[in-house]
Image (cartoon, rainbow, N blue to C red):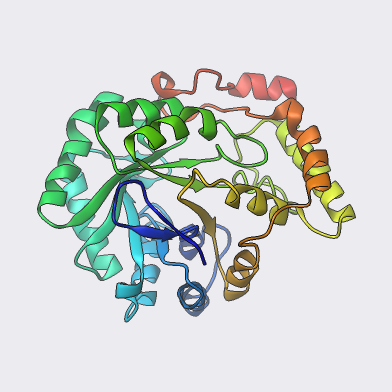
Amino acid sequence: MYYRQLGKTDLNVSIIGFGAGPLGNAYGEISDDTGKQAVHAAIDHGINFFDTSPYYGLTLSETRLGHALKGYRQKVLIATKGGRYGIDVFDFSATRLIRSVEESLQRLQTDVIDLYQLHDVEFVSKQQIIEEALPCLERLRKQGKIRYIGITGYPLHLLRDVAMTFPVDSILSYCHYNLLNTTLQDVLVPLATKDGIGLINASSLHMGVLTEQGAPPWHPGPEPVHEAARQAATIAREYDTDITTIALQFALQNKDVNTTLVGMRTEAEVHQNLALIGTAPDQELLARIQEIMAPVKDINWESGLPENYEPDAQSQREKDSEG
């Protein structure tokens, strides 16, 4: 395993982080024991960064992770979130965040959270994030409830603007550094490098697009993106590999990212992901895939409040017309 310092913090995180969304049955139901075995296998092989949220499985992910980490707490770094509690349930008020931190501490069975993040900040006003939510987390840090503060979300420009206004320790971005979209490199890396902000990359499989089975029906990306991924998957099989392997290899090569979160449901998936550390994608295959992806590369979709959309975000109408 390799480790990188998360920004200017004293957290040295494994380059693969354990995305604990699957512990909340986000990608199909698993048993408590299956999830626990996955967590223990990850720890045994050097993964020390675990990212969860009360939103994942409506507290199930945090609860399962807390149980699985009994006896292992000193070996791991726990990141969780607050502000999002359901598909359309958002509350970034100071009152709710204070209560949310206490609830997460109980579910995770710990007395301090290493990294506490505001979850999907695009769904409320930037003003509330900067003037209420982040100052609240700063007070909780001074009380010793949390160690470091982060923000997460989809629109890169919003994340950048918030971090330029209020000092945060980390930014978690999803679907913006992978085979289909690399705009994180241009928008966030310069700021993170200059200010010493930790960068966490999530959804290197583009929320399921870069898999053999393809994305779930709810995926917001336009049809041409899915079609390009299907073509790339076919070519990957010609090289006796699969699109998921190439996608993870590609993401893990980015040294400007401190850790790449990968959702893991089972011990077998943990071992599959660990086997990719230090490996590089076949360059001929990668070139062919990138050629296929070129016409649909860096497409963004709408997420959150209209005022927080990415400048080039596609509307549903535009996606339908392309399909």
Does 268 sit left or right of 310 as displayed? right
Residue 120 % position (x, y): 39, 39
Which residue: 40% across, 36% down? 193
Q: Foreground residue, 212 or 285?
A: 285
In the depicted structure, whether residue 273 falls above or below residue 177 = below
Does 2 sit left or right of 169 as displayed? right
Which residue: 55% across, 37% down? 176
Does 143 sit left or right of 147 as displayed? left
Q: Residue furthest left?
A: 143
Q: Residue furthest front?
A: 194
Is residue 125 something that shows in the picture? Answer: no
Does 209 sit left or right of 174 as displayed? right
Is residue 191 something that shows in the picture? Answer: yes
Which residue: 33% across, 57% down? 11
Residue 287 % position (x, y): 79, 40
Residue 178 % position (x, y): 62, 42
Which residue: 67% across, 49% down? 247
Q: Quadrant of the C terminus?
A: top right
